[in-house]
Image (cartoon, grey):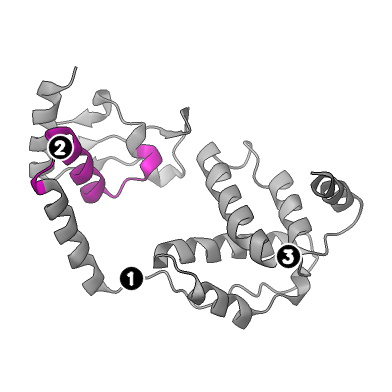
Amino acid sequence: MILSLRRNINSELRAPETVSELIAHYRKHELVPERKAFATIESTGHYLKRHIEANFGSKRFLEIWTIDVEMWLHALNYAPGTRSKIRNIMSALFNHAMRYEWMDRNPITKVRNIGQALARDRYPYARRVRSSTFRAELRERTMVILAGSTGLRRSELVALTWSDIDLELMLVNVRRSCVRNRFGDTKTEASRKPVPLHPSVAKTLAAWREESP
């Protein structure tokens, strides 16, 4: 606790040197409600602490090299999308350092994108969705197919109410998000666009609407 407070104080008196100090500065000046949605602040803070700071915190950020980061990301036992998320947050962190003119390069820009799953990987996912809903109760089945067919974020799904569902036009109107029981705006402006529903999904929603209080 004392070391953390000392690091935050020192980061205001001089330019950051370590990755931990850079993260502290980034949190204070970028991860704030005036700039980011609550959900973004929470999720980005989690990745910064658990992955980036845990592995590179004590290193000088001027001595972070592309190939080292790329090898580290490939070694992580996470889905490609998660590793890509970590890469993008790390890149934003170094862009922050460049904005303050503490460095003239971003070593993450040349890290190969490892977040793109192969097209053939999508089909087993579709089969898993079908198999998981085959014997499920109506409520659980509705949850799974709505999440699997719309691609909405978890925070957006949790925030949905029946007033957001238009069964006649077969659309979902995404108006808000919910993270840790706190409602707020969606992560991006594009997230607020209506999402079309497949007829089978709309049919399942209608069936659940009849049973839902």
Q: Residue 208 lies in what quarter of the image?
A: top left
Q: Between disc 3 and disc 1, whose residue precedes? A: 3
Q: What's drawn in magenta, residue-wise?
A: 134-156
Q: Between disc 2 and disc 1, whose residue precedes? A: 1
Q: CA distance from mark 3 to mark 1?
A: 31 Å
Q: Amino acid at mark 3?
A: Met
Q: Main secondary structure of the magenta part?
A: helix
Q: Amino acid at mark 1?
A: Ala
Identify the residue at image location x=92%, y=51%: 13
> Is residue 66 found left or right of 146 in the rendered image?
right
Q: Amino acid at mark 2?
A: Met
Q: Residue furthest bottom?
A: 67
Q: Give the residue at mark 1.
A: 117
Is residue 102 rendered magenta in the image? no
Label 2 with label 1: CB-CB less than 8 Å: no
User: Does the image show residue 39?
Assistant: yes
Q: Give the residue at mark 3.
A: 98
User: Does the image show residue 196?
Assistant: no
Q: Give the residue at mark 2.
A: 170
Q: Where the N terminus falls, by quadrant?
A: top right
